[in-house]
Image: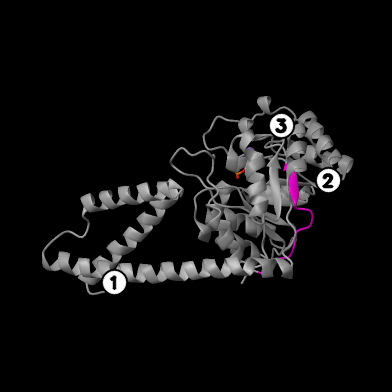
Amino acid sequence: MIATEKIENCSLIAGPCSAESEAQVMECARSLARMGVKVFRAGVWKPRTRPGNFEGAGVPALEWLKEVKAETGMAVTTEVANARHVEAALRAGIDMLWIGARTTTSPFAVQEVADALRGTDIPILVKNPINAELELWIGAFERLSNAGIRRLAAIHRGFSSYYERIYRYSPEWQIPIELRRRIPGLQVICDPSHMAGRSDLIPHLAQMALDMKADGLFIEVHPNPCEALSDRNQQLTPAQFKSLTEGLVYHREAAPSDTANLEPYRSKVQDIDLKIIQDLAERFRITGGIGEYKNTHNLAILQPDRYNAISGILAEKGKELGLDENFIQLLFETIHAESIKCQINKKNNI
Ligand code: PEP
Ligand code: MN
């Protein structure tokens, strides 16, 4: 059981991807402080997928963050990936640290960071691992919690995929939902900048995150994104950031009257869900019979022609009913995979 305490002021964290120079950091920080941002982010050590790119200004950049703190009063946060980073950041009085997506994938690295943090009570934000594996994300919280860190929060920054998608990193909203269920009370902050990978898609993702109950937003802002040394396409100018924050709709908590008004819809939806489950049980009972026939007549379980034909029929019907094509495909693939599993189990008497 991971017990977490609330981290203050993390409803809006903003700043450049990388701290590039004192002038860039200070210019960005001043404009964000004027807009009321309370926590300033900037990467000092940058994990780059390929070598040869800008890897951060390193230790000297910590001095710039100290200057941000002293001049604007904002708290500052940076990424750490090993014990050396942690020690230098703690010495510089950085207020909050984050563990990056590439680091969360590595239990050795997370353990090293956790060991270096032992005995401190600095707030730690943990980005999701770059691959869609919830257990690695939870494992990182467990390692930090075991090291005595109490103020923990998650940053949902999307997951990598082999396929070209509209977003640089796919949101997979169900993963942070499940994370909240597994670690009750954990704050989940959304990073729509890395998720989008493109500045024009950020406002809509930021709003979507609030609609999904994000506790805060973590956004990249650069005084001159076209000249940024990292993540050029996804950084907002301070003016774009201002208009994004002004356009966000924050939701109120549901009142008892809302619950009462929604009740008739919810009960209908629940009836439909129950019917879907009953229909599925009936469907698998019938496919069990098909499995038996295939087995006694020496037919392969997978019949590709039938699979393709039924996929086509369902896609067509889904389209006619205005349902999302990918959703229908995914749904049918899931049902079909379960059907195959039932037939295999039946054949093997499992
Ligand atoms: C970042 O926030 O600049 C960063 C490197 O993020 P991520 O670990 O999500 O790629
Ligand atoms: Mn970045």
Identify the residue position indicated by label 3 in the image.
20
Identify the residue position indicated by label 2 in the image.
74
Q: Secondary structure at mark 1?
A: helix
Query: How busy is the neighbourhood of tag 3: few (under 14 within 10 Å), some, or many (20 plus)?
Result: many
- Residue 108 visible at all: yes
Q: Is mark 2 within 8 Å of ligand 1?
A: no
Identify the residue position indicated by label 1 in the image.
285
Badge number at residue 257:
none
- Choose top left, top right, bottom left or bottom right for residue 299: bottom left
The image position of residue 14, as x and y in percent, is 74, 42
Does the stretch in magenta take in 13? yes
* Residue depicted at x 50% and y 52%: 132
Residue 247 or residue 209, whichever sits in front? 247
Tag 3 near tag 2, CB within 8 Å: no
Query: How busy is the neighbourhood of tag 1: few (under 14 within 10 Å), some, or many (20 plus)?
Result: some
- Choose top left, top right, bottom left or bottom right for residue 201: top right
Residue type beneath disc 1: Arg
Q: Say if 63 sits above or below 158 in the image.
A: above
Between circles 3 and 2, the one closer to the viewer is 2
Residue type beneath disc 2: Met
Q: Secondary structure at mark 2?
A: loop
Magenta stretch: helix, strand or loop mostly: loop
The image position of residue 96, as x and y in percent, is 74, 52
- Residue bounds of the magenta highlight: 3-14
Between circles 2 and 1, the one closer to the viewer is 1
First of labels 1, 3 by sequence position: 3
Q: Say if 327 sits above or below 219 in the image.
A: below
Does the stretch in magenta take in 304? no
First of labels 3, 2 by sequence position: 3
Q: Is residue 26 left or right of residue 186?
A: right
Q: Say if 34 sits above or below 5 in the image.
A: above
